[in-house]
Image (cartoon, grey):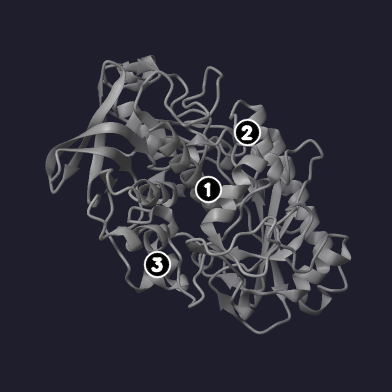
Amino acid sequence: MKSHCHYIIIGAGASGSVIANRLSADPSVQVVLLEAGEWDQTANVVEPGGFVKLWGSQLDWSLPTTPQPAMAGRELTINQGKVVGGSTSINAMMYVRGNPANFDQWQALGADGWSYKDVLPYFKKLEDYQGGDPNFRGTGGEISVRDCPDDVMRSEEFLQAAVELGYDGPHWDYNGERQENGAALLQFHITPEGQRASSATAFLQPILDRPNFSLITGAEVTRILIMDKKAIGVEYQLNGKIEQLLVEKEVIVSAGALSSPKILLLSGIGEAEHLQSVGIPVQHELPGVGKNLQDHVQLPVIFRTNDGPMTTLLTGNALFVRTNENSVGPDLQLNFTPSIPAPLAPVLPDFGGNVCIFLPILVQPKSVGDVKLRSDDPHDKPLINPNYLEHPDDMEVLRKAIQLVRNLSNTQAFAPINGGELAPGPGDPDGFIRTQSSTLWHPAGTCKIGTDDLAVVDSRLRVHGISSLRVADASVMPNVTSGNTVAVCFMIGEKAADMILADA
């Protein structure tokens, strides 16, 4: 095993895999990618329908939250991939770039060079999407993106109902020029052959034979080695033994918005008082590590249908809406499936008939939480407190979402399949929201870009106060984007690689 290399990347997820691919394209540079999970291309990973069986499996970190007061005291589980490909290997494959205004807001918050015009070329570079506007969409990239491929998941009734209410559509490219106020078929990172397009298959499988690239699986990072405010290597556990790997150039942490702050904290980088409380020597006080945690919240709104019974794997349709004129881009993503999505089937009541599901998603949450260490043991899961629905505006968005669903259901277009509302039903919806809402597993923001007191990295993703150390994943988002986050994580990896190469 190598004792040193030029670059160490921690985490083979959406961002880390892209970085590994781009950096190792230079044969003179030795790149090591550390991944706690294993390589897995079995049927449940490869076939789009298998992802439901992966949640809670050995391929999932299954990270619990603390009890959430505004969600009736419930503890939720956040699924995060523990496998090569990270969450791109276990997610529902929905591909949403977010809203251009999200990135312009990042720029305004101190993320210089992350405006929409700055990130658009990276979105275009990495994707292969056929039939889009070439000013905004890319072809020939590593990630295959397709419109909803399953006729069962499509619902022209939903799309036409949205058009009847004045929204654009029915087949709007929300990843094109404009996201907002358009009804659309959802897009997925799926190959033309109908298989999952993960970061493992798209970015790592083609480079496994590069002599200057090493993928070490089963390697759980315990800390980053720091000397004189400089990252000099990584300590990790492999097959029960502690190993150390030294680095000549940089360590890049791409372990995700829950594990990246955990690794920094274990390394002595974070709020001094918290580090001391769990017995970790302070290497550098950086109070924002683990702060600013944001996540999307989903809520099922259920109607009886006049159609025959169906169960589908995913939702195939979406509408992006701004319920508050002061929101930065859409604050609501409304997904719809004309049947019960398999992921929700085990947790929904048996309504004794055929149902369809509207799935409002709070995509610009104002509730903010944090990630802390439980102890100084690297194998302990972190303390995750998202503070879901603590901000009153988040509840208001979901109340408005329920009313929007009712407006859609009352259209002429939806009438043929509308068998009546089952849940939440009449009365005050707040109790239903607090007991039935859940995470969409899109944590972000815990090592945010910026210049304020809680910023962790600068606009080039370098950790403030520690040289030769960067973070590149969902944790660097100043604010979470309006939609599923995997596309943004691919983009962050692509842009990070460019910056690392430029700074070399």
Task: State the image quarter where residue 287 is shown.
Answer: top left
Q: Quadrant of the C terminus?
A: top left
Disc number lying in front (2 or 3): 2
Rendering coords of residue 193 (x, y %) = 48, 78
Q: What residue type is disc 1 on? A: Met
Q: Is residue 190 above or below residue 69?
A: below
Disc number lying in front (1 or 2): 1
Q: Which residue is mark 2?
A: 106
**Residues at marks 2 and 3, CA–CA distance in whole angstroms:** 36 Å
Q: Dot 3 surroundings within 10 Å: few (below 14), some, or many (20 or more)? A: some
**356 or 48: nearer the eye?**
48
Q: Element at badge 2?
A: helix
Residue name at image x 64 percent, y 77 percent: 353
Marked residue nearer the N-terminal end (1 or 2): 2
Whether residue 426 is visible: no
Q: Residue furthest bottom?
A: 308
Q: In the figure, is residue 1 to the left or right of 429?
A: left
Q: Dot 1 surroundings within 10 Å: few (below 14), some, or many (20 or more)? A: many
Q: Which residue is mark 3?
A: 53
Residue name at image x 53 percent, y 68 percent: 345
Q: Dot 2 surroundings within 10 Å: few (below 14), some, or many (20 or more)? A: many
**Residues at marks 1 and 3, CA–CA distance in whole angstroms:** 28 Å
Marked residue nearer the N-terminal end (1 or 3): 3
Q: Is residue 430 above or below residue 354?
A: above
Q: Element at badge 1?
A: helix
Residue name at image x 81 percent, y 71 percent: 160
Rendering coords of residue 64 (x, y %) = 41, 44
On residue 491, the disc is: 1
**Residues at marks 1 and 2, CA–CA distance in whole angstroms:** 14 Å
Residue name at image x 42 percent, y 62 percent: 202
Q: In the figure, is residue 101 to the left or right of 192?
A: right
Pointers 2 and 3 in contact (C-beta within 8 Å): no
